[in-house]
Image (cartoon, coloured by chain):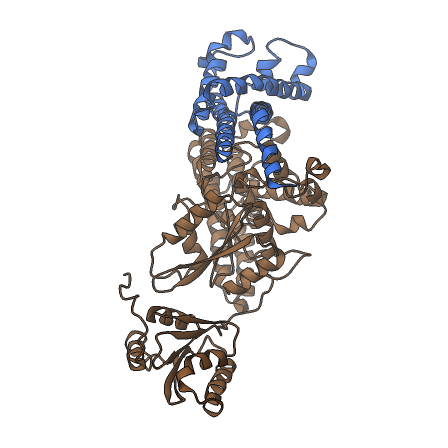
Amino acid sequence: MKQKDNKSLISPEIKNNEAYMKERLGVGVSFDLGFRDLTILKKKVQIYYLTGLCDSLIIQDLLEMLIKINDDESNSRKLHEIIENRLIHQQVTTIETMDEAVDQMLSGLIVVFINGEKNAFVIDVRSYPGRTPDEPDTERVVRGSRDGYTENIIENTALTRRRIRDARLRNEMLKVGERSKSDICVSYLQDIADDGLVNLIKEKIEAIEIDGISMADKTVEEFIIESKWNPYPLVRYTERPDVAASHLLEGHVIIIVDTSPSAIILPTTFFHHLQHAEEYRQAPTIGTFVRWIRFMAVFASMYLLPLWLLFVLDPTLLPKELSYIGPNEEGNISITIQIIMASLGIEFLRMAAIHTPTPLSTAMGLIAAVLIGQIAIDVGMFSPEVILYVSVSAIGAYVTPSYELSVANKLINLLLVILTGIFGLTGFIIGIVLHILYLVNLRSLRTPYLWPFLPFNPKAMLHIIFRIPVPYANSRPSIVHPKNNYRQPTHESKLT
Amino acid sequence: MTEEKQLDQNKRENRISILSRSLITGFIGGLIWSLFGVIMYYFNFSEVAPKSFLLRSWLTAEWTSGWLGDLVSIVFAGVLSLIAALIYYGLLKKVNSMWMGLVFGVILWGIIFYLLQPIFSNIPALVELNKNTIVSTICLFILYGTFVGYSISYDYHDAKLNKQKG
């Protein structure tokens, strides 16, 4: 698939270049490739551009300046220098191979060939179609900045740079995709992020050989992580530049992929997926409260249904005080089947909600509420308690800040229900232990997934359980192996 | 506030505290998993509770059967767990695998439920325990062993890695 002829040089004979462009790019066939032939001081000059990705006003300005040369200058031997001077733009570079010319032109730059010259000028006048930064739907906060990443990688790196004006912030650009030539930016703080980690990520990205990555960040993620079949999200996505910036300061590495509004945060643990910008916008006590409630909800989304099912199947397990738990009437279908059906029903709704057009969503909500909520009970298909517990579990899944994590938990929840339904207590206990051991064994780029709970790290665990006030949260998390451990001057160094 | 100085501080911290961190892990591990033991007993997953080992076998006072008995036995389990952590630290910390911790938990279960069973007057013999109790307690000890073992060996190897980097 690799192109072998990428060393073909720009010919001094402009006709050769024209033929090359016609043959390789199909100038004149593809309508979006623009081409203008000029004669300046009796020499042929050709301009190539991509109509959709350049600002046409700038092209007009450039053309005007070039044509004016005919009126103002007469020394055609110095045409190269004259043209270089008259290209009124801040980003003008010289290139020497045709391959570069083609690449640059296809990413929206203007290429200028001059007859008799062995090189060409490229002018960066890119303006990509896109939206302006607005608040991401998936990570809303009550207070706090409302800008979010867009599909434009340049804007995205700029949004991060606005928050960290550090000379040591590195934004390294890599190209992936033999055909798509997509840009990928690896951002890290040079004196904090672990070199091993940065190099590992760059190696993995450079090793990608594929024609194109139109699913952008997700495709890159699948190339980077090791266990490709596991349901749990091993990287964290964020569309908020403030979240990305705070992770950079902690020593994480951020990967931004062009055409995607989500940045990838590496490395990630299970507990990163339970954090949300909102708790850092509240008083630490409130943040802690919010976090505990969220832990409870996420816990419920995983284990509540199988636990309740266990008590229904074997009421002798319940202590006297709690013996009222369990359905009042059994119904016609076994509770296990009821739970599975109701959970699948909720999954139907969730999927339908993603791509139902807005005008139909009211109708969908109505059908869902009436069908599942009322008729199913009246007909005797579901017992009311099943609806209650399945709903609590579903709401718990919606509380999970990471959408990917909530879906993975849902899957585990369903497996545990099936195990409990078949094997009772043994199935439940062994299922939970296997689930925990599976999570412990997972690794995201050499990072244990359940850190800091297992392997246990007291200090980091404290930061998970409590939202520590920022002035007291001085050290960076050890899991990223930061080269520089402290975020604020320590007392000892303050004295010296 | 030079970088050199900060790195020096890290190193010193690491050297003194691997053992103490292991002990903290042991203590917290004892607390957490004996708490789960109490919960399991409450929901009749298991016929035996931490307090049946640690208190009821020696004491018959009224308070030992109530919540105070649970609380005291949880703290007591935390203290005893220090010994388990020390043993793991001494013998197995160099094995860089979570599975070793798991095996450690199972061995610990075998010792407590089979070898040491005659000491505890309040605990029935292994063959007399029902299936649920055996499964629940083995699972609890597996999680406990993984918690203590994996944490200690991970910490040890992580500290070694940091030292190599300088």
Q: For chain B, what colour was chosen?
A: blue
Q: Is residue A464 left or right of residue A256?
A: right
Q: For chain A, what colour was chosen?
A: brown
- Residue A368 on image: x %, y %: 53, 57
Q: On the rendered image, what quadrant is the C terminus of chain A found in?
A: top right
Picture quadrant where residue A241 is located: bottom right
Q: Is residue A234 left or right of residue B41?
A: left
Identify the residue shown where x is 54% and y is 67%. Answer: A358
Picture quadrant where residue A491 is located: top right
**Relative depth, front residue between A94 and A427:** A94
Identify the residue shown where x is 44% and y is 40%. Answer: A415
- Residue A468 on image: x %, y %: 68, 41
Q: Reply above or below: A22 against A7.
A: below
- Residue A126 on image: x %, y %: 48, 72
- Residue A313 on image: x %, y %: 49, 33
**Relative depth, front residue between B166 and A381:** B166
Q: How many marks?
A: 0
Q: Reply above or below: B119 against B103.
A: above
Q: Is residue A368 shown to the viewer in this render?
A: yes
Q: On the rendered image, what quadrant is the N terminus of chain A found in?
A: bottom left
Q: Reply above or below: B13 against A334.
A: above
Residue at far bottom of view: A71
Q: Is residue B49 shown to the viewer in this render?
A: no
**Relative depth, front residue between A321 and A177:** A177
